Image: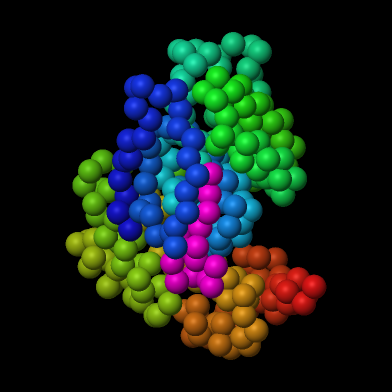
Amino acid sequence: MRIFRENIVSPDNLFVVKEEQFKYNDFPFHFHSEFEIILILEGSGQRMVGDSITEFNGPDLCMFGADLPHTFYTRGLSKNEAIRQIVIQFHENFLGPGFFDRKHFKQIKDLLQRSSQGIVFDENTTALIAQKMNALVAKSPTETVITLLDILHTLSVAASYSLLSSSGFLHSLNVDESTRMSKVYDYILDNFKRDISLDEVASIAYLSPSAFCRYFKKFTRKTLSEFLIDLRIGYACKLLQNTNLGMSQVSMDAGFNNVSYFNRKFKAVKGQTPMEYQRRFLIKRAN
């Protein structure tokens, strides 16, 4: 998964608003100087934000701060690989230097600061913002500025949200680190469903196992084992949401070779057993 800097907003534009559709999303882990509000209208999979790996199931609303690495990944993770989304991207000073430093915009300034870790909002806020973002696509240039300020205000006063990445995540990447970690991410994403060893992943980074452990932990704030468990549990969640597979099959398909270990780790991460988690979605599908 190539980690790269993306350039988005040209000097001729205040910000970017776009509606997009993809057959699947395997967009590279990337970062950019713009803030981003992204509304996933349809699709499910995993979101990677900084050192966080979590599942998403549209509608889903997130906000990312400047230079925070992130991506949404759906390819091969669920039956609902197709993505439909609306994205807003803007620089902090799109209305002029220091605009949000004024006391009138303190809540929005706080929102921008929180977004440095990535924010995911609750269902009520998502539904409210979805109406505004759907309308935004068809508005005139002047109306889009007013609506974006309204969206930022609404997000800034939202009572229920979760921060995604840890506060200590390292945002800055040099070219060599980016290239090396890109190869590591590619390899892990292609192979996490099978048993992979520390030695083989370390060899991708041309590091000794001990040096790789320090390097990987510095970048992701997770051990390789913890990172793999997060990926596998995220994939298991997609299987449990969309299939009637038994726990043994889900465990094996997600890369766990021991059902008891799978059950234990799943409950530690999700707060419930895989069977309890699956039962919720079986009831939803039946209704």
Which image quarter: residue 79? Answer: bottom right
Task: Work out whether 39 lies above or below 211.
Answer: above
| Residue under the image location 32 percent in, 50 percent down | 3
Which image quarter: residue 202? Answer: bottom left
Foreground of the two, 243 or 179: 243
| Residue under the image location 41 percent in, 73 percent down | 192
Task: Work out whether 22 lies above or below 118.
Answer: below
Q: Find residue 29 and report its horizontal and vertical position in percent.
A: 38, 51
Instruction: Find out whether residue 157 is within the magenta segment.
Output: no
Left or right: 256 in relation to 159: left
State the quadrant of the C terminus: bottom right
Instruction: Find out whether residue 80 is within the magenta segment.
Output: yes
Task: Work out whether 108 lies above or below 246.
Answer: above
State the quadrant of the N terminus: bottom left
Q: Find residue 213 and report its horizontal and vertical position in percent.
A: 34, 60
Span highlighted in magenta in the image: 72-86
